[in-house]
Image (cartoon, grey):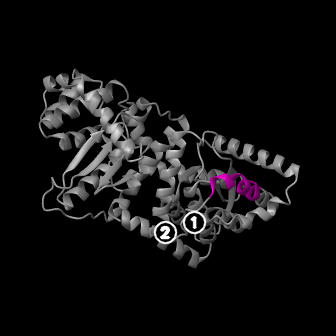
Amino acid sequence: MKSRLYQWLLHPRTLRTREHLFSLARRVKGQSQKIDLFYRCGDPQAHLLLLLTRTLGGAYGIDVDVRLLPGSENEQDSSAAQLQRWRLRDAARFARALDLPLPDSAEPRMRAGCEAAMAYSWRRQRSLEELCDLSTAYWNGESAVWSRSLSRLKATDHAHQRILFRDNLAYLESLGHYDANAIHYDGVFYRGVERLRHLTLRLRRAGLVGGDAAERANLAERLDAIENRSRDLTVATTDSASDAPITLFFSFRSPYSWVALPRVLTMADAARRTIRFRPVRPMVERGVALSPEKRRYLVLDAAREADRYGVPFGRIVDPLGDGVATALAGFFAAAAIGLERRYVEHVMAGIWAQGLNLTRSAEVDRLLVSVGLTRRALEAQRASAGNDEILKANELALSQQDLWGVPTVVVDGRAVWGQDRLWQCTE
């Protein structure tokens, strides 16, 4: 019953009705339409989103309210350093694809000064153009551009900055979101430049084209560059598939792994390559906590991404716990007889689109029959101590790519994390 409810809540028609109701509620309240952009200095992905949001606001005639957020408290942690390295690599790839300035020369020790300058500028004149200039100067290492404003700051300005950050964090929390590098428009969040396509489609569906036509064309051209790459996933063909397999790190509990799977299979088949499937445990079982806000966003976002790529999605039964253990045991049983691809396709579709409950024996038995496995083979793998070592080796191999999330695809030595970044494999 619960899976049917998920199916209804995550159906594309329901999601669009939800968007319409949020917009209707705003109009009933007599509020003007605006975009809230949550930005954190030092985040290169947020910098790119700031630059494109400037174009977006002009393209559709919508005011942009920039919500400046402070730096994270754990920025000295090794995990935070790893995240920042990935952000820099990822932002560089997006900047090239979008024909935007490359953010690569920032001095982290200067971030606090740039934060102060941006907070002062926004509070004083609320100029999106000036914020873009200050952010660009930071990423170009041009401290003189924003350091001049620091000499004009008074003690009260620093107090106002703390209040601004506190209020913006509280506002983000009140909207039910969890981090910067995100746009909020009429009840819905769009995280990163890679989700602006969803927002522009929504604006066009609503007939909101009251801005600058040239800016709309400019923005559409940039976003099309990403959209076209996302659909034309072509890698070099090999004479022997075993010579250059494509490696897929995935989790049975990752909705994005399921959204990515059909395109990874198509990409591999077109290039006559095999896929080396490397399962990892869910992040929560690897000690990575997910807040309720983040879990909620991820499922809603995965639903609209699944719709974007025509992947069945929504009738979900969360396999966490015994379900994941069963899925992994079955995978190792399938891998022992060369059926891992068939097994992964069936199980992922079952979990994320067909309401497969892996804690029910009858449903597991039907799954085993459909993929050509036996209950005895499953139970033998469940009792095998060696599979835990394989999972640990997979997780170590993922970390050696300086990554930790799934799906991660490795093609000819290049590792790419994210179903919405598969195009980076083909560069």
Image location (x, y in percent) of residue 41: 65, 54
Image location (x, y in percent) of residue 95: 50, 66
Is most of the magenta stretch helix, strand or loop?
Answer: helix
- In the image as oriented, which residue stretches furthest toward the top? 383
Residue position marked by numbered label 1 in the rendering = 52
- Which structural element holds mark 2? helix
Q: Which residues are magenta?
A: 107-119
**Which residue type carries mark 2?**
Leu
Image location (x, y in percent) of residue 325: 30, 27
Name the side, left or right, on which 272 lies relative to 281. Answer: left
Residue position marked by numbered label 2 in the rendering = 98
Residue 87 vertical placement versus 175 (above, below): below
Label 1 neighbourhood size at 10 Å, few (<14), some (14-19), many (20+)? Answer: some
* Residue 219: in magenta span: no
- Give the mark nearest the N terminus, 2 or 1: 1
Q: Nearer the viewer, residue 399 or 23?
A: 399
Q: Quadrant of the N terminus?
A: top left
User: Does residue 363 show up?
Assistant: no
User: Does residue 188 show up?
Assistant: yes
Residue depicted at x 15% and y 40%:
339
Q: Quadrant of residue 244?
A: bottom left
Mark 2 touching mark 1, by CB under 8 A?
A: yes
